[in-house]
């Protein structure tokens, strides 16, 4: 069973598949332009000590997301 969780809940080194992006407008367009879309595989590279920022890898690109942005992304198949 594939349960959905938020990207912000993934641990360092974890890999997951994007199930849904709950952002709208320019933020959603920016995330999509970086390759962060439904079905994309993401890897959690780093989490700030305060969990305020996350570094993820999508394809060959590394992105830094704020906690608020990471909480808008639902993922599944977390491993």
Image (cartoon, rainbow, N blue to C red):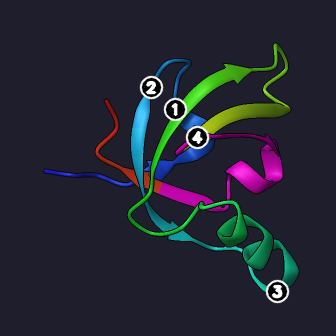
Pointer 1 with pointer 2, Cβ within 8 A: yes
Quadrant (top left, top right, bottom left, bottom right) of the C terminus: top left
Q: Which residue is mark 3?
A: 25
Q: Which residues are magenta?
A: 59-74
Circle 3 Cα neighbour tier, 10 Å, few/some/many (<14 / 14–19 / ≥20): few
- Point out which mark residue 60 bears: 4
Q: Disc 2 on helix, strand or loop? A: loop
Pointer 4 with pointer 1, Cβ within 8 A: no
Question: Could you tell me residue 22's position as x and y percent?
Answer: 63, 73
The mark that comes first in sequence, 4 or 1, is: 1
- Point out which mark residue 58 bears: none
- Distance between mark 4 and mark 2 Cα atoms: 16 Å
- Point out which mark residue 14 bears: 2
How many numbered discs? 4
Q: Which residue is mark 1?
A: 10
User: Can you say whether 69 is above or below 57 in the image?
Assistant: below
Q: Nearer the viewer, mark 4 or mark 3?
A: 4
User: Can you say whether 76 is above or below 32 in the image?
Assistant: above
Circle 4 Cα neighbour tier, 10 Å, few/some/many (<14 / 14–19 / ≥20): few
Of all residues shown, which one is farthest toward the bottom? 25
Give left or right: position of 49 versus 12.
right
Q: Disc 1 on helix, strand or loop? A: loop
Q: Nearer the viewer, mark 4 or mark 1?
A: 4
- Judge by depth and name the residue closer to the eye, 17 or 11: 17
- Judge by depth and name the residue closer to the eye, 35 or 17: 35
User: Can you say whether 73 is above or below 50 in the image?
Assistant: below
- Distance between mark 1 and mark 2 Cα atoms: 6 Å
Question: Could you tell me residue 67's position as x and y percent?
Answer: 79, 43
The mark that comes first in sequence, 3 or 1, is: 1
Q: Nearer the viewer, mark 1 or mark 2?
A: 2
């Amino acid at each position: 069973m594939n349960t959905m969780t938020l990207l912000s809940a993934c641990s360092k080194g974890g890999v997951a598949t994007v199930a849904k992006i709950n952002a709208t407008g320019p933020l959603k367009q920016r995330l999509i332009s970086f390759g962060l879309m439904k079905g994309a595989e993401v890897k959690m590279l780093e989490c700030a000590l305060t969990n305020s920022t996350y570094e993820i890898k999508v394809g060959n690109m590394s992105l830094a997301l704020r906690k608020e942005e990471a909480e808008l992304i639902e993922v599944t198949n977390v491993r």
